[in-house]
Amino acid sequence: MTHEVREIEVKYRVRDLSALEEALARCGAFLSSPARQDDQAYAENGWTYEQSKLGATFARLRTQQERHLFTIKRPLDNAMACLEHETEVTDREQMHHAILAMGFHPTVRIVKTRRTATFGDMAICVDEVEHAGIFVEIERTVSGEESGTAVQQELDTFARSLGVELERTTDTYDSLVRAALALA
């Protein structure tokens, strides 16, 4: 029997970073030191941004502190409720070519500085994303039986309880960076 892990998240544009940092600290969620992440996003050949992400499979190759992670995500309930599989790889360049050979094409490069914290069973990521701005992601990893939209409602309730002005977005970082670069 396989155990399907799903990552469920909500994402918000942050208007006042210091207010968010203070609100997180008040509830005991202390942010880590910053780490730079360099992500290359990939989509299945034939998929374009004009199409829905639901049911499509996406890949990501991330480098952080000389470690390379290969991730596959498949949005189920919506673009932020995904079946996810991830593993470390030793050679980013070779993995890039393997991803291309598997039938994916590169879409957007996402470079960000990330600080993380945990609060209960939630992971909190504060990201300064090149070209797109500052965001906070709040996520939980759940089993396949839980409703992604119900978990997102719980995560949104927590976000709103912080008392900080946040603008929720349903766009993923690749879509946000792509849109920002199109305006540049």
Image (cartoon, rainbow, N blue to C red):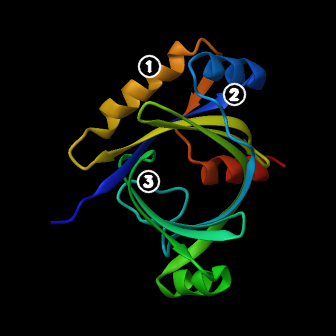
> In terms of image quadrants, where is residue 166?
top right
Q: Earlier in the sequence, mark 2 or mark 3?
A: 2
Q: Is residue 20 left or right of residue 141?
A: right
Rounded to the nearest whole Å, what is the CA distance between mark 3 and mark 1? Answer: 26 Å
What kind of residue is marked 1?
A: Thr
Q: Residues within 10 Å of mark 1 (few under 14, many from 20)?
A: few
**Image position, residue 4 (x, y; %):** 27, 58
Rounded to the nearest whole Å, what is the CA distance between mark 2 and mark 1? Answer: 16 Å
What kind of residue is marked 2?
A: Val
Q: In this figure, which residue is indicated by the disc labeled 2?
A: 14
Q: In this figure, which residue is indicated by the disc labeled 3?
A: 52
**Image position, residue 109 (x, y; %):** 70, 63
Residue furthest left as drawn: 1
- Work out whether residue 103 or residue 125 is closer to the camera in this orientation and state it: 125
Quarter of the picture containing the N terminus is: bottom left
Rounded to the nearest whole Å, what is the CA distance between mark 2 and mark 3? Answer: 26 Å
Q: Give the numbered dot on residue 183.
A: none
Q: Earlier in the sequence, mark 3 or mark 1?
A: 3
- The mark lying in front, picked from 2 and 3, is 2
Q: Which element type, helix, strand or loop, lies under badge 1?
A: helix
Q: In this figure, which residue is indicated by the disc labeled 1?
A: 157
What kind of residue is marked 3?
A: Ser
